[in-house]
Image (tube, rainbow, N blue to C red):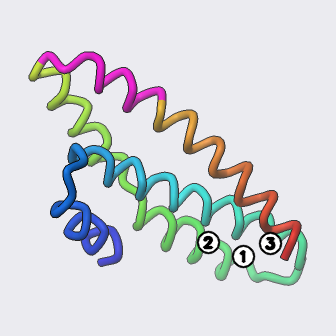
Amino acid sequence: MLRYLIYKMMAYSTYPVFISTLLINFIGSLLLGFLLGYSIKQGNWSENSLLFLTTGLCGGFTTFSTFAFENHSMLKDGDFLNFSLYIFGSIFFGILAIFLGLYISKLV
Protein backbone atom coordinates (compact mmCIF):
# COMPACT_ATOMS: atom_id res chain seq x y z
CA MET A 1 0.00 0.00 0.00
CA LEU A 2 2.83 2.38 0.85
CA ARG A 3 4.49 1.72 -2.51
CA TYR A 4 1.22 2.46 -4.30
CA LEU A 5 0.77 5.67 -2.31
CA ILE A 6 4.21 6.89 -3.35
CA TYR A 7 3.46 6.01 -6.99
CA LYS A 8 0.23 8.00 -6.82
CA MET A 9 1.92 11.00 -5.20
CA MET A 10 4.68 10.97 -7.81
CA ALA A 11 2.16 10.66 -10.64
CA TYR A 12 1.30 14.32 -10.20
CA SER A 13 4.92 15.40 -10.60
CA THR A 14 6.82 16.17 -13.77
CA TYR A 15 9.39 13.44 -13.12
CA PRO A 16 9.56 10.34 -15.36
CA VAL A 17 7.64 7.38 -13.92
CA PHE A 18 10.80 5.37 -13.21
CA ILE A 19 11.91 7.98 -10.65
CA SER A 20 9.23 6.77 -8.23
CA THR A 21 10.54 3.18 -8.48
CA LEU A 22 14.09 4.44 -7.95
CA LEU A 23 12.95 6.39 -4.88
CA ILE A 24 11.02 3.44 -3.48
CA ASN A 25 13.97 1.10 -3.95
CA PHE A 26 16.31 3.65 -2.33
CA ILE A 27 14.03 4.04 0.69
CA GLY A 28 13.61 0.26 0.97
CA SER A 29 17.38 -0.29 0.79
CA LEU A 30 17.97 2.44 3.37
CA LEU A 31 15.41 0.85 5.69
CA LEU A 32 16.87 -2.61 5.12
CA GLY A 33 20.37 -1.42 5.98
CA PHE A 34 19.09 0.33 9.08
CA LEU A 35 17.06 -2.66 10.28
CA LEU A 36 19.93 -5.09 9.76
CA GLY A 37 22.45 -2.79 11.43
CA TYR A 38 20.15 -2.01 14.34
CA SER A 39 19.30 -5.68 14.89
CA ILE A 40 23.00 -6.55 15.00
CA LYS A 41 23.61 -3.69 17.43
CA GLN A 42 20.74 -4.75 19.72
CA GLY A 43 21.44 -8.46 19.37
CA ASN A 44 18.09 -9.52 20.80
CA TRP A 45 15.74 -9.62 17.79
CA SER A 46 14.10 -12.92 17.02
CA GLU A 47 14.76 -14.50 13.64
CA ASN A 48 11.04 -14.28 12.84
CA SER A 49 10.92 -10.56 13.62
CA LEU A 50 13.97 -9.89 11.49
CA LEU A 51 12.59 -11.94 8.59
CA PHE A 52 9.25 -10.18 8.80
CA LEU A 53 10.80 -6.72 8.75
CA THR A 54 13.49 -7.36 6.13
CA THR A 55 11.99 -9.90 3.75
CA GLY A 56 8.34 -9.06 4.42
CA LEU A 57 8.28 -5.30 4.88
CA CYS A 58 11.31 -4.22 2.83
CA GLY A 59 10.90 -6.97 0.24
CA GLY A 60 7.21 -6.17 -0.20
CA PHE A 61 7.87 -2.45 -0.41
CA THR A 62 10.65 -2.53 -2.99
CA THR A 63 9.95 -3.85 -6.43
CA PHE A 64 12.30 -5.64 -8.78
CA SER A 65 9.53 -6.63 -11.18
CA THR A 66 8.54 -2.99 -11.77
CA PHE A 67 12.21 -2.09 -12.17
CA ALA A 68 12.60 -4.80 -14.82
CA PHE A 69 9.42 -3.80 -16.66
CA GLU A 70 10.36 -0.12 -16.72
CA ASN A 71 13.78 -1.01 -18.13
CA HIS A 72 12.14 -3.18 -20.77
CA SER A 73 9.87 -0.28 -21.73
CA MET A 74 12.82 2.10 -22.05
CA LEU A 75 14.70 -0.36 -24.25
CA LYS A 76 11.63 -0.96 -26.39
CA ASP A 77 11.21 2.82 -26.83
CA GLY A 78 14.90 3.26 -27.66
CA ASP A 79 15.49 5.42 -24.58
CA PHE A 80 19.02 4.15 -24.01
CA LEU A 81 20.18 7.15 -21.98
CA ASN A 82 17.47 6.84 -19.31
CA PHE A 83 17.85 3.06 -19.40
CA SER A 84 21.57 3.35 -18.61
CA LEU A 85 21.05 6.02 -15.96
CA TYR A 86 18.29 3.99 -14.33
CA ILE A 87 20.26 0.73 -14.25
CA PHE A 88 23.45 2.24 -12.90
CA GLY A 89 21.65 4.71 -10.65
CA SER A 90 19.58 1.93 -9.09
CA ILE A 91 22.64 -0.16 -8.33
CA PHE A 92 24.70 2.78 -7.06
CA PHE A 93 21.98 4.36 -4.94
CA GLY A 94 20.77 0.98 -3.65
CA ILE A 95 24.23 0.10 -2.35
CA LEU A 96 24.72 3.64 -1.04
CA ALA A 97 21.40 3.39 0.81
CA ILE A 98 22.43 0.12 2.47
CA PHE A 99 25.67 1.71 3.70
CA LEU A 100 23.80 4.81 4.84
CA GLY A 101 21.21 2.72 6.71
CA LEU A 102 23.95 0.72 8.44
CA TYR A 103 25.71 3.95 9.38
CA ILE A 104 22.53 5.52 10.77
CA SER A 105 21.84 2.39 12.82
CA LYS A 106 25.18 2.89 14.59
CA LEU A 107 24.20 6.43 15.58
CA VAL A 108 20.85 5.46 17.10
Q: Callout 3: few (<14), some (14-19), or many (20+) C-alpha neighbours within 10 Å?
A: many
Circle 1 residue: 47
User: Residue 105's x, y, as percent?
Assistant: 80, 68
Which segment is the magenta one? 78-88
Q: What amino acid does circle 2 point to?
A: Leu
Q: What amino acid does circle 1 point to?
A: Glu
User: Residue 83's x, y, as percent?
Assistant: 30, 25
Q: CA distance from mark 1 to mark 3?
A: 14 Å
Q: Residue 20 lies in what quarter of the image?
A: bottom left
Q: Is residue 6 above or below residue 67?
A: below
98 horizontally vs 28: left or right:
right
Mark 3 residue element: helix
User: Do the residues under discs 2 and 1 have CB atoms within 8 angstroms?
Assistant: yes
Circle 3 residue: 38
Circle 2 residue: 51
Picture residue at 61% right of the left edge, 71% below the top = 51
Picture residue at 29% right of the left edge, 37% below the top = 68
Which label belongs to residue 71? none
